[in-house]
Amino acid sequence: MKKLLLIIFIFINFLYAQSKEVLFLNSYHKGYKWSDDIINEVEKKFKDLEDVELTVLYMDTKRVGSSSYIDKLYALYKEQLANRKFDLIIASDNNAFDFAVKYYKELFKDTPLLFCGINNFKKNELPKDKNLLDNISGVVEQVDLEKNFKLILNLQPNIKNLIIINDQSKTGLAMKKDLAPIMEKYSKKVNIEYIDNMDIEHLKTKITNLNVNDTAILLVLLFKDSTGKFFTYKQSVMQIRKASKVPIYGLWDFYLDYGVVGGLMTSAVAQGEAVSNMALRILNGTKIKNIPILEKSPNRYLFDYDETNRFDLDIKGVVKNYEIINEPHSFIKKYTKLVVITITIIGVLLIMVFSMRANIQRRKVVEKALQNRIKFDKVLVDTLPNPIYYKNKEGKFLGCNKAFSELVNMSKNEVIGKTAKDFFPPEIAFKNARIDEEIMATLGTNTSEMTLHTPSNHMKHIIINKAVYLNNDGSIGGIVCVMDDITDRIQQKQFIIQQAKLAEMGDMVAAIAHQWNEPLVELSAQVQDIQTSFLLNELKDTQVEEFVNDSMIQLKYMSKTLTDFRNFLKPSTTKTLFSIRESFQEIFEILGKQIYYSNIKLKLNYDHEESELLIYGYENEFKQVLLNLINNAKNKIIEKNSEKKYNLIINISSCENFTTIEIMDDGGNIDEKIIDKIFEPYFTTKSDGTGFGLYMAKVIIEDKMGGLITAQNKGKYVVFTLKLHHNKG
């Protein structure tokens, strides 16, 4: 417990040790401008120091200065300050400094003592106490009387009389002592009259009659007249100013602004600033004995504009560095801050105006360019053959181009406000609405196909390209749709397919001839046989029945061949699921014997022998592709004119989504230089070729059925690979 109390005690002492206390001992009273200016400077310097506490004591010796009063102050301060320890004492003016020196041991032992405003300071007259001498420094108040005499004579070269007004205060008596040698020195140049024992009324009467052209007054001090009447500095100087018609010069700055011309003045502000800087050094750890006494008083040339102007005194011709109070400022000088703010505001406003003007000009240019662009875009969009419309996110049409209005047989104004249900069948409108929802959710695009019956009863195959457009704030504005009419392209491709079929007809007719040759021979033999039996009267009913049955078999076979040929020529109009195996069977029923008689070994390989492989597409067009590829392989082998046995291999495999068909032959590789061009339209290596066959195959497999067809050389084989969907997905 004792240890805890000791720690707390040390901690509290430490906290107290951190804060510093300063005592300001003021000779005079609050409201006395000289003292107030000094204290204000000290307080200004200490304002931001949170760890410094400033205590001010006013001795009021300007009003009461007897020795008994001083003794009573000592007794009061001894009791008042008994329990306080100060880090620094500041004494302002002679009375406070003399008091602090006299009672230093009793009140302020070992405490640094700074002074300011001290007249006639002489360090050798201080008590010989070394401890005291090592703890004293400060700022001397030294009135430069001779420079003020010179100033008066320079400003008023015609002066003959100089009236010096003083009082008999302690400071006044000290000043009288300093004035004596100066007055003696200048008595030969000007008539000097010294007044320090006259009541105020007689003094005013005396100065009222002074000659304005050859006389001046030097006001030293006047706080009490010969009757014992006290005056404030303001009262004394104002009464003299009211009575005087001649210039009044002063030695202290607190007389300014109340009627004195000015002079080389002792400044309370300068005193306070100088002693404050010393105090800060001491509080920051500098020993006071290392801070020398400032023996040259920081005096300044100060003048009152009103008084210098009143007596037409030329300050500039006499003094270089000086300050003037009450100088009438021009509006700009008087209201500098207001003018600067106003000019700044005007400047900013001008910049804003010019900027806005430039911006308006730019906007006009941009608006004009935008209007021109809008007009251009309007013409451009109307010129495009593609039907275009745009609608909001609710699905209502906001506008369209000329091509769309012609497609739906409405004016562009009639289109606005309508929905897809007004133009398309319900199933197409529903499908479009679903697509719109999807792309607005993903901010993506979509391409789809539809078949449309126009109001003029024409069927159109159209690709619809849709994209979401955004507003300036990033929100969804709606959907833009560009329609591509592919009717002509589809018809052209279909024409090419049919043209390619016709190109294959020669081979097909030859195949039919091969197919019909054997049944015709068989029919011929049966007819001859039945005729012979009839001539020999050996014809029996059973023979006739067999003849009819056999003939019908051959005729049905020949009829089926014609049906297959007719189906091959007829285009498929819709996609269906159909059997690959059946497609190959129908092709080989037409080409099988030709392949056999061409010395070609045919091998058909199914990965799934027991299951039925289906693909999704156009059945007859697919058969046409198979016919073209197999015919090409057969014809290439026939051109070899060789007895060598060649191979035609067909591999059929299936995975989850695709069926793959490979058609391979060893009739000779394709030149690598042209293998990438064989699917191009009109490209052929045959002298009598059209260049439509493989191009037609690519159009059917890739464009119409969404698959893939490729060709490559693998060793001695040429391999055509078809990759096709085997479901509707």
Image (cartoon, grey):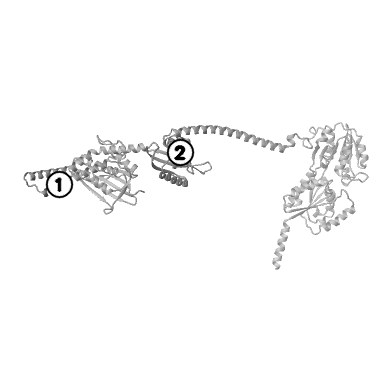
Q: Nearer the viewer, mark 2 or mark 1?
A: 1
Q: Tell me the residue that label 2 is attached to.
A: 389
Q: Residues within 10 Å of mark 2 (few under 14, many from 20)?
A: many
Taking depth in this image into account, of 358 and 47 the one nearest to the observer is 358
Choose the circle earlier in sequence order: 2 or 1: 2
Q: Amino acid at mark 2?
A: Tyr
Q: Quadrant of residue 446?
A: top left
At a point 85% along the width and 31% down the height, the residue shown is 157
Instruction: Report the residue that reaches farthest toward the bottom.
Output: 1
Q: Residues within 10 Å of mark 1 (few under 14, many from 20)?
A: few
Q: Tell me the residue that label 1 is attached to.
A: 548
Separation of residues labelled 2 and 1 (CA atoms)? 69 Å
Q: Amino acid at mark 1?
A: Val
At a point 26% along the width and 45% down the height, the residue shown is 664
At a point 49% along the width and 44% down the height, the residue shown is 394
Q: Quadrant of the N terminus?
A: bottom right
Please provide percent x and percent y for residue 46.
74, 50
Say left or right for 403 vs 656.
Answer: right
Please provide percent x and percent y for residue 194.
91, 39
Taking depth in this image into account, of 47 and 539 the one nearest to the observer is 539
At a point 35% along the width and 37% down the height, the residue shown is 489
Q: Is residue 190 above or below residue 528?
A: above
Please provide percent x and percent y for residue 718.
26, 44
